[in-house]
Image (tube, rainbow, N blue to C red):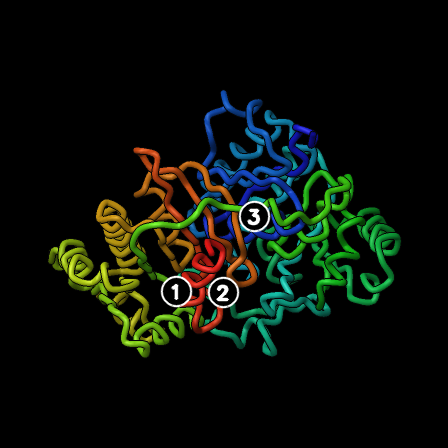
Amino acid sequence: MPDKGIKLGCIADDFTGATDLANNLVRAGMRVVQMINVPDLSIAESVEADAVVIALKSRTIPAAEAVDVSRAALAWLRAAGAEQIYFKYCSTFDSTPAGNIGPVTEALMKSLDTDFTIATPAFPDNARTVFKGHLFVGDVLLSDSGMRHHPLTPMTDANLVSVLAAQCATPVGLIDYRVVSEGATAIRARAEQLRTEGVGIAIVDAVSNDDLLRLGPALSGMPLVTAGSGVAIGLPANWGIMPSRSASALPPATGHQAVISGSVSEATNGQVSDHLRRGLPAYPVDPLGIGSGQDVVGQALAFADQHLASGPVLVYSTDGPEGVRSVQGRLGAAEAGALVEDALGRIARGLVDRGVRQLIVAGGETSGAVIQALGVDQLRIGEQIDPGVPWCTTPLPGGETLHVTLKSGNFGTPDFFTKAFAVLERSDA
C-alpha cells in the first residue's frame, strides 16, 4: 500500500503549465491530483496522492495579486502535509520586469523561511535548454525566438540571471553546466558557496535530461524548488518512487471531438494551419466582431452544430503578431484578451452541452478561461500526447467523463490536434 502522505506540493502559474508538470510527475511514477485554483481547506487532509498540483491563473495578473494567490496555495499545501514545495512557471520564463516569477519566488521563500532556492526553466524534451545562464528555444536564444513578440510577456533578454535579477531584491547567481556535469555533490557544494556569498536564487544550467536527473538528488530536502516542468523528472526518485504505466490509465473516451485555440504562438499557428490544410471544419473567432456586439458565440456554436457529427471541429482566434497588434490597437491589449477568453469559454460550455467529450484547448490563458467556464475543479492526469501535454479527465454531471488536454501555446508538433485524438483512439483499442 503506497504511503498516503503528500510528498510534493506544486504551485503552477497557469493551467497548461500545471498539466505539463503533472504529466512529468505521472510519467515518473507519482500519483498526482491537479486542483483548479486553491481548494477549500477542509479537504486538505483527505487528498490521497504523492503530489498535488494547484493550477493558478497568475502568470500575467498584477504581481501583488500573484503573490497573494500563491501564498494561499502554499498555505493549502502545507496544511495538506506537503514535504517540499515546487513553484512551476513556463519553460520560456514568461515574465515582465515587474514579475511575476521573481516576486512570487521571494514571497514563497519568506513564507517557508528559506534563504536559498534554484531556478531553471530547462525542459530538453521540448527543446528548452539553459547554457551559461542563457535560455535557448530550440537552436536560438529566447530573445531571438517567437517569444520576443508575445503580446503579454515579450521576452527580449535570454540571460536568465539578469531577467530574474531585475525582478528581485534577492541576489541571483548561476550554477553552470560544468558543475552540473559533476553531479549532485558538486551541485550542493556550489549552492552552499553561493548561499554563503549572499546569493538567494541560483539559475541552473541544463542542456539534457541527464543534467536534470543529476540535479534531482541535489534538491532533496530543499524547502522550495522553482522551475519549469523539466526538473520534475528527477524528483520522485528522492522518495523511492519509480515509473509505473498504471499511473496514466484513464477511462475510455466517448462523444464528439473539438479544438478551441486562443494561443497566438508560432507553434499553435502551425497546428491551426495543419488542421485547415486537412480540410477539417474550422470557425475563426473575430475579436473585433465580439467588440462590436456580434453574437460570435452563437455563430460558432451554430457552425459546430453542422459539423460535429463528421469530425473534430476547430474554433480559433489564433493570429500572427501583426494581426494581434492590429486588434490590440483598436480594442486595447487587456480588453481584447478578456473578450476573446470570455467568448471561447462560453463556446467551450456550449460544445460540451452539445456532446463534445474529447476537447483540446490551446493556450494558457485560453485554458484557464475554458476550465473556469466548465466549472472544473480537479483533473486526473493520463497519457502524454507530446512532451509536456497529457490527456486528462474530469467528471461531468450525470456520470459522464470529459477528456480534455490543456496545451501550452508553444508546445506540440504541427499535427498535434490530429495526433491527440489518435492517442485516445489507440489507448481505447
Up-down relation of residue 2 to residue 249 (above or below) = above
Q: Amino acid at mark 2?
A: Phe
In the image, what residue occupies the spot 64% across and 62% down? 122
Q: Hey, which residue is sitting farthest top in the picture?
A: 42
Up-down relation of residue 217 to residue 388 (above or below) = above
Disc nearer the start of the sequence (1/2): 1
268 left or right of 2 in image: left
Instruction: Evaluate whether residue 291 shows in this view.
Output: no
Q: Position of residue 255 (x, y in %)?
A: 31, 51
Identify residue for label 1: 151
Q: Quadrant of residue 262?
A: bottom left
Q: Are marks 1 and 2 in contact (CB under 8 Å)?
A: no
* 3 or 2: mark nearer the eye: 3
Q: On residue 248, which mark appears?
A: 3
* 3 or 1: mark nearer the eye: 3
Q: Amino acid at mark 3?
A: Ser
Q: Position of residue 365 (x, y in %)?
A: 39, 53
In front here: 112 or 209? Answer: 209
Disc nearer the start of the sequence (3/1): 1
Identify residue for label 2: 411
Q: Are marks 3 and 1 in contact (CB under 8 Å)?
A: no
In the image, what residue occupies the spot 37% across and 75% down? 274
State how far apart marks 3 and 1 are (Cα): 35 Å
Disc nearer the start of the sequence (3/2): 3
Up-down relation of residue 297 to residue 318 (above or below) = above
Q: Position of residue 169 (x, y in %)?
A: 64, 48
